[in-house]
């Protein structure tokens, strides 16, 4: 199967589609297939991100230059 040719045929068919029910089914399928990275990470990663956002909101930040100079030996 030539996937590129199949995509083009599908796009052409979809472009000429006037059936809103079928179009809405495709839209629903697309939404189901689109993964939100937040849903893909574990609880610990979410907590760490939320903690970092809270620290940033509280002004508890380290300047980029300071971080880069500290870790430049590993970059």
Image: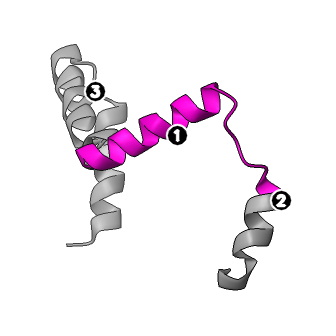
- On whether residue 43 falls in the magenta region, the answer is yes
Q: Residue visible at 52% across and 40% down? A: 52
Q: Quadrant of residue 30?
A: top left
Label 3 CA crowd tier, 10 Å (few <14, some 14–19, many 20+): few
Can the viewer see residue 57? Answer: yes
Q: Residue visible at 44% across and 41% down? A: 49
Decide: marks 3, 2 in contact (CB < 8 A)? no
How far, Cα to Cα, is label 1 from label 3? Answer: 46 Å
Q: Which residue is mark 1?
A: 52
Q: Counting residues from the N terminus, which is met first, the one under dot 1 or under dot 3?
A: 3
Label 2 CA crowd tier, 10 Å (few <14, some 14–19, many 20+): few
How far, Cα to Cα, is label 3 from label 2? Answer: 54 Å
Q: Counting residues from the N terminus, which is met first, the one under dot 2 or under dot 1?
A: 1
Work out whether 72 lies above or below 28.
Answer: below
Work out whether 58 lies above or below 70.
Answer: above
Q: Which residue is mark 2?
A: 65
Secondary structure of the residue carrying tag 1 is helix
Label 1 CA crowd tier, 10 Å (few <14, some 14–19, many 20+): some
Secondary structure of the residue carrying tag 2 is helix
Q: Residue 20 at what x, y percent from top left?
A: 23, 15
Q: Which residue is mark 3?
A: 17
**Residue placed most toward the observer, 8 or 64:** 64
- On whether residue 34 falls in the magenta region, the answer is no
């Amino acid at each position: 199967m030539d996937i590129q040719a199949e995509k083009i045929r599908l796009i052409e068919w979809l472009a000429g589609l006037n059936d809103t029910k079928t179009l809405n089914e495709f839209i629903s399928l697309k939404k189901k297939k689109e993964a939100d990275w937040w849903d893909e990470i574990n609880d610990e990663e979410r907590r760490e991100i939320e903690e970092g956002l809270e620290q940033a909101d509280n002004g508890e930040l380290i300047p980029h230059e300071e971080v880069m100079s500290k870790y430049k030996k590993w970059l």
